[in-house]
Amino acid sequence: MSEPVFRSASLRRIDAEHAGEPLMQRAGAAAAAWAAELAGGSGHPVLVLAGPGNNGGDAFEAARLLREGFFAVCVVFAGDPSRLPPDAAAAYERFSAAGGTTSESIPVGRWSLIIDGLFGIGIGRAPAGQYAAWIAGANEIAARDACPLLALDCPSGLDADTGRAFDPCIRASHTITFIGAKPGLLTAEGPDHCGEVQTACLGLSPVPTHPEDGGQAGLSDFADFVRPRRLNTHKGSFGSAGILGGAHSMVGAALLTGRAALKLGAGRVYVGLLEPRPPACDLLQPELMLRVPQALFQADLSALACGPGLGASLEASELLETAIATTLPLLFDADALNLVASEGNLQVALASRSVPAVLTPHPAEAARLLDCGTGEVQADRITAALEIAARYHCHVALKGCGTVIAAVDGRWWINSTGNPGMATAGMGDVLSGLIVALLAQGWPAEAALLAGVHLHGAAADRLVAGGAGPIGLTAGEVIDAARSIFNDWTRARQSS
């Protein structure tokens, strides 16, 4: 099972269900343990920012324990202790009874560690007033002193459900999140503000999930389909993938998709090119079988990817209509998505298919599919992905930082592999090839989508770890890395 991801409403329900347990003390203890490590040993100065809610209570607990560990702790707090929530008020009393005091402003000095305990998941708007000033000040001090900035549960100013960063927002080097991961830590602007993330489950393991909760995409979500190959096989055993695209001046997109499909194990790969004067073969990958587009539908295909370099011509639209009318597993990307967004007949046909297709939009393509602005998509990526899945009766991967995968039945995942080196031309074409290869080999659409997205990012991560990027990483390089990782997974399954 994948690691769960909790929205704020679920976390509040979990808190209420475990009201009799000392969750705040456990949170403070977990935070203090990591803080002591980050601060570099007892005696070092630690600045703690405590807010007016339960996140402030976590901060008071951590501060008390750090003082007991002989750290020089300064707690900044400007709220009214009598107005704190009950658990946070009790934490404040324990801190005060142990001799702790607070300041209403950040004192001048140098710090070994800053702890952000202002808001956590409890904010849905931009911080204002003194809290905004404290957030800006903490960011400036952390940068000036090159000291760690540890956020409790979620960096203050970051929407825990969406990953939207308000202005100002804590830019943490480390985040200790409680009970389970939050969507905002994993997608959109969250990863840029969270730094290294650790989860403290506070003794609630396994943590109960609710229907609106998601997961973190990983090998466990599709491991059952990663199987060693039998010896008695032939190329027909592994399906035939078709690629529809490659209009004038965009042939490379379709070829990248075809190369990725071939190297992830499709037995045959046919590439139908709309280019009026197509090449006779791919000189770098002559195993690809290049065809005119109409010939794709005469081949014995097992799955079809539509869109890489497809263009927006009448021919492209008619070919998409033909593709949708088949019973093949389909993947739509790039221009195929734009054509669907602009043509009502394609929308109706796609949503009416008995076999859900796979859609892999980037945020701008998602906005066209939803007839809204890109900013609206990015403001709540999970909701956007789920809405596309429901509207078009398809499985969806909304690409970007923390790709969101949404299934037709309303389940969702966030993928955490990948890096900024993937922000370059052709990466989406390679992803399409990885997914259509798995579809051609008989994988269910949901599993193929999860595996393709996770593998794509993992391949880029391996390349960066080996020194190839992130700057200058190319889409073509990812293909061989993906093949290597997939074979590693297969060998591991064979030996288990």
Image (spheres, rainbow, N blue to C red):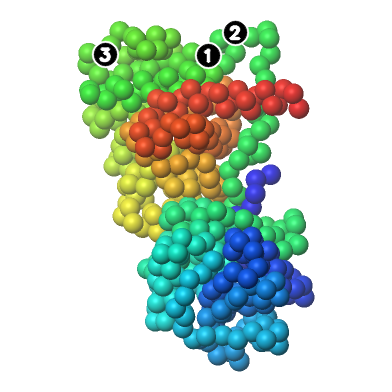
Type of residue at label 3?
Pro
Nearest to N terminus: mark 3 or mark 2: 2
Count neighbours of disc 1 (C-alpha within 10 A) and say few if under 14, some if 14 to 19, many if 20 or more.
some
Does the image show residue 281? Answer: yes
- Which label sits on residue 278? 3
Nearest to N terminus: mark 3 or mark 1: 1
As measured in the structure, the alpha-carbon distance from the residue carrying label 2 to the one carrying label 1 is 8 Å
Type of residue at label 1?
Gly
State which quarter of the image contains the N terminus: top right
State which quarter of the image contains the C terminus: top right
- Which label sits on residue 234? 2
Type of residue at label 2?
His
Image vertical order of residue 442 relative to residue 22, above or below: above
- Residue at the image point whose x is 43% and y is 9% from the top: 287
Image vertical order of residue 55 relative to residue 213, above or below: below
SS class, disc 3: loop
SS class, disc 2: loop
Location of mark 1 (residue): 267
Query: Can you give x and y, in whole percent of width and height, for residue 413 in the image?
Result: 56, 47
User: Answer yes or no: do the residues labelled 3 and 2 have beta carbons within 8 Å?
Assistant: no
Query: Can you give x and y, in whole percent of width and height, for residue 205 in the image?
Result: 75, 57
Between 411 and 296, the one lying in front of the other is 411
- Residue at the image point whose x is 67% and y is 73% from the top: 70
Nearest to N terminus: mark 2 or mark 1: 2
